[in-house]
């Protein structure tokens, strides 16, 4: 059912990409106010300014780094509408695997010299087994997906017939790097979600991600945030955490931490599912049932200049660098590679709060939350759309899909359709 009223007062709670997209669309016909708890707008589109005294000042992205035309069609359409697509440039999707426990080092994404970085692997049957199993996995996974054989199966259960070598050096590192999963949650991840994500990103056919064209923002993702702000006609309240939302038949009341309350005709919850449930005063049984199934993992992203966190040989430097040591996996993003930086200093993001980095090499630390996908949470996704409209409330966020920018944009687009806005 569509809300055909015009010039409504709408509160958007959450200034991440789903909140930004909701506000961008709804402002076409309504008076929109954004409430964001942090000091900046963008959520995972978090660009930080670097003044190192050597290079001209520039911005680095610390969470949202890369996207492609195939898997991000709605996000691409959005940034074209903002007139910032001309700030998009090619990026490199490459991986480097450094398994010190097994003395195994190789890369994917740049060619055979990467794959056979260790010449001994030319004659190593166990090494070839990783790629034979990768071919087997891609073939079987695609077949099982299209034939609906993945319901209620965890990734650990699905991969029970595959070798530990393949799982530890191919599946686990990619799951960690894509979803920022802690090691202990990898094998409880839903097989269907993992495989559908792989399919949507062109990983199950041909040469996978190598075939896709990947992009980043020249000047970081702050380009599209600033472009949105320049075109936004509503109000943005930063550093304004919402305490609770009371909902009534004809309006909603938003209470902020400073004790002030404001009345609106409608409210858009563009926050994480668990946060949303805490904000709602007197949630319905359906809201409790669906939103209550979602849990989140908080990961620490460390911005630093310590090159020892990736392989010492520049021949094995990649955009995504997976290091396995003492049965623990660490992911480090090489920002110079991803963002095409021409700086004299190398910059990295490592996802590990316990990693040992010299204090003078750490620039900052950032905390980001990611939805934890399990069998119970993904079962709610088909019904989440049914929450929209009840007591003047609407919901969006990356948890409606795979946890990425495109999913958040699409969910916000569907909220706008409820208001008759294309």
Image (tube, helix red, strand yellow):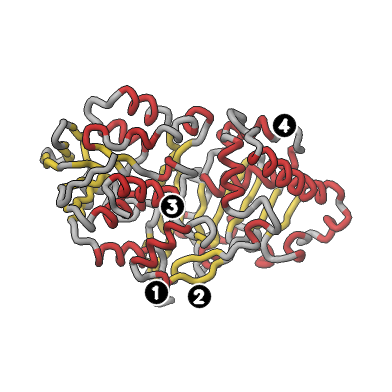
Disc 4 target residue: 160
In the displayed structure, 254 sits above or below 318; it is: above
Classify 10 Å Cα crowding around label 4: few (below 14), some (14-19), many (20 and above).
Answer: few
Residue where numbered disc 1 is placed: 53
Q: Which residue is mark 3?
A: 405
Establish if 333 lies above or below 345: above
* Of the image marks 4 and 2, the number of the one nearer the N terminus: 4
Nearest to viewer (mark 4 / mark 3): 3
In which quadrant is the N terminus drawn? top left
Q: Position of residue 193 (x, y in %)?
A: 56, 39
Residue at 25% in and 65% down? 231
Quick check: marks 4 and 2 in contact, CB under 8 Å?
A: no
The crowding category of the residue bearing disc 2, from other C-alpha atoms within 10 Å (few below 14, some 14 to 19, many at least 20), is few
Q: Tell me which label, 4 or 1, sits earlier in the chain.
A: 1
Q: Earlier in the sequence, mark 3 or mark 1?
A: 1
Helix, strand or loop status at disc 4: loop
102 relative to 405 in the view: left or right: right
For the residue labelled by badge 1, is the local secondary structure a helix, a strand or a loop?
A: loop
User: How many C-alpha atoms fall within 10 Å of the one at disc 1: few (<14), some, or many (≥20)?
Assistant: few
Residue nearest the viewer, comparing 81 with 164: 81
What residue is drawn where x is 54% and y is 39%?
182
In 3D space, how far apart are the residues under numbered discs 4 and 2 (Cα atoms)? 44 Å
């Amino acid at each position: 059912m569509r809300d055909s009223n015009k010039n409504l007062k709408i509160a958007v709670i959450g200034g991440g990409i789903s909140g930004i997209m909701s506000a961008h669309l709804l402002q076409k016909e309504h008076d929109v106010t954004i409430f964001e708890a942090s000091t900046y707008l963008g959520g995972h589109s978090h660009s930080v300014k670097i003044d190192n005294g050597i290079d001209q000042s520039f911005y680095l992205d610390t969470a949202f780094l890369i996207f492609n035309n195939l898997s991000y069609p709605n996000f691409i359409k959005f940034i074209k509408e903002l007139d910032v697509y001309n700030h998009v440039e090619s990026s490199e999707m490459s991986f480097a695997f450094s398994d010190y426990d097994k003395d195994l080092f190789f890369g994917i994404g740049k060619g055979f010299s990467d794959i056979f970085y260790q010449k001994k692997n030319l004659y190593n049957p166990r090494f070839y087994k990783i790629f034979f199993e990768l071919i087997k996995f891609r073939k079987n996974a695609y077949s099982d997906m299209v034939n609906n054989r993945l319901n209620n199966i965890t990734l650990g259960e699905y991969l029970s017939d595959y070798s530990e070598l393949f799982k530890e050096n191919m599946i686990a590192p990619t799951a960690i790097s894509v979803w920022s999963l802690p090691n202990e949650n990898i094998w409880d991840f839903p097989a269907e979600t993992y495989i559908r994500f792989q399919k949507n990103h062109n990983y199950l056919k041909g040469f996978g991600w190598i075939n896709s064209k990947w992009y980043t923002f020249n000047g970081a993702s702050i380009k599209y945030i600033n472009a949105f702000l320049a075109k936004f006609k509503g109000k943005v309240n930063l550093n304004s955490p919402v305490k609770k939302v009371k909902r009534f038949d004809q309006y909603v009341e938003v209470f902020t931490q400073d004790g002030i309350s404001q009345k609106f005709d409608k409210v858009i919850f563009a926050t994480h599912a668990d946060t949303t449930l805490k904000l709602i005063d007197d949630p319905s049984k359906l809201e409790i049932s669906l939103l209550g199934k979602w849990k989140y993992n908080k990961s620490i992203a460390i911005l630093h200049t310590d090159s020892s966190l990736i392989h010492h040989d520049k021949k094995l430097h990649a955009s995504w660098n997976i290091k396995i040591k003492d049965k623990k996996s660490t992911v480090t993003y090489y920002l110079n590679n991803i963002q095409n930086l021409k700086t004299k200093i190398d910059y990295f993001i490592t996802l590990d709060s316990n990693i040992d980095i010299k204090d003078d090499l750490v620039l900052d630390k950032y905390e980001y939350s990611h939805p934890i996908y399990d069998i119970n949470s993904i079962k709610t996704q088909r019904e989440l759309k049914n929450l929209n409209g009840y007591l003047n409330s609407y919901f969006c966020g990356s948890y409606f899909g795979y946890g990425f920018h495109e999913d958040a944009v699409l969910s916000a687009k569907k909220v706008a359709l409820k208001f008759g806005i294309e």
